[in-house]
Image: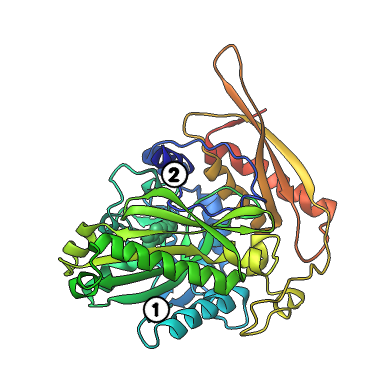
Amino acid sequence: MVLLLRASTCTLIARHVPLLSSARLQHRRSLFFAAKTFSRSASSAASKRARSHVHASIVQAGGITISREDVVKEDDPTNNVPDSVFWKLGLQLHRRDDHPLGILKNEIYKFFEDKFPGKYQKFDDLSPIVSVTSNFDDVLVPPDHVSRRYNDTYYINSDTVLRTHTSAHQAQKLREGCTHFLVTGDVYRRDSIDATHYPVFHQMEGFRVFSPAEWDASGMDGTSFALQDLKETLEGLAKRLFGDVETRWVDTYFPFTNPSIELEIFFQGNWLEVLGCGVTEPAILENNGRAGTVAWAFGLGLERLAMVLFDIPDIRLFWSSDLRFTSQFKAGQLGIKFKPFSKFPPCYKDISFWISDSFTENNLCEVVRGIAGDLAEEVKLIDSFTNKKGMTSNCFRIAYRSMERSLTDDEINNLQARVREEVPGKLQVTLR
Ligand code: DAH
């Protein structure tokens, strides 16, 4: 059941803040359709090239130089990375000490450093471009798991993706001989548009290996020993971040752990999911030179925690370079609450069309983001019906809003006109 739930929402770990999330209807189709949908027309390729001059077409990440041409391949049907995502590579918000994500990362580092001085190796500059093998196979994600689809993952080609989670580095770090490590990085997923979803977000992975001598002395079996240590460690981390909160553990499913559990905290009247974790599947240890050991692993989403800890109401704000946002945070200060500098009204525009089999909401969101960028606040299915001929119509409401300024009617009408222009050709739907 839990597996099905995960599969249908297509995240391995939930990324939304329940309080803020809106109900979403997801349509998922085959990899083939999604890839075809995103082969671009010549005119859009030209407009993208024109726009790319404004931004750097080379970025640095994970000690390597990445050029736009390496990542965005408009004529390659096995590639579905848009320019808007390329421009995020290399920004590495989690490495800025005075950014909420960097402040949170450093606080978690401090927790591990205080509890286990010198024990944990920390990596926050590993390249987000990884093989399908590292991202999925090495952590035992089944071959038919929905998270592998083109609808959900950014593929550079059929063998290479933008990592969808920091678990992509588990096997590599084990092979390098690491036994205690934290990996922080930007991760990428094709997704819907709302206040808590953005195609790029940040995760931290934790991993600890135990040798038989460590659990033998306790009289427990390795799995029970690791599970107990995992719970103690993460309850301690939750208290460090949130103060003296009530915590609870919920059983769940992840392909890479067994048992798999989630930590929830009781915060401001609600149970809030904080992270996913569990005892590592023995095959991962065996396949990577650690047979006979037991390990635990966890993965947490930094935005999700930072939105709660800093009172940040919209995930787009993390990307803002507006001084009214950035100047509110100071290195080392976790407790600061964000004060909204102003709230500009949203403007809603509806678009209705007859869908085809290949239509997915993620593909629509990709088109909207490609045109409106961060001005797109939410895309929401507000009506759907099927007529006597079996044709299905969907109506989506797009909310446009800037976090930083008011938008003019002309500007919004222009964005909406471009959405209406691009949607039929890119998504094979018929406007109504
Ligand atoms: N990789 C998972 C995700 O992105 C998060 C996660 C869950 C990581 C459990 C772990 C783990 O290491 O044990 O959804």
Q: Look at label 1 and name its amino acid.
A: Phe
Which quadrant: the C terminus? top right
Quadrant of the rendered structure where residue 217 is? bottom left
Q: Please provide percent x and percent y for residue 45.
A: 52, 55
Residue 355, compared with residue 136, is above or below; it is above
Q: Please provide percent x and percent y for residue 416.
A: 72, 45
Q: Please provide percent x and percent y for residue 80.
A: 44, 52
Q: Residue at x 44, y 60 (%)?
A: 72
Tell me the distance, in whole angstroms, between the alpha carbons under discs 2 and 1: 28 Å
- Asked if one can make out residue 63 in the rendered structure from this viewpoint, the answer is no
Q: Where's ligand 1: which quadrant?
A: bottom left
Is 49 left, or right, of 231 in this rendering? right
Q: Residues within 10 Å of mark 1 (few under 14, many from 20)?
A: some
Question: Would you name the residue on which mark 2 appears?
Answer: 6
**Viewer-proximal residue among 82 and 260:** 260
The disc at residue 123 is 1
In the image, farthest residue toward the bottom: 118
Q: Residue at x 52, y 34 (%)?
A: 428
Q: Look at label 2 and name its amino acid.
A: Arg
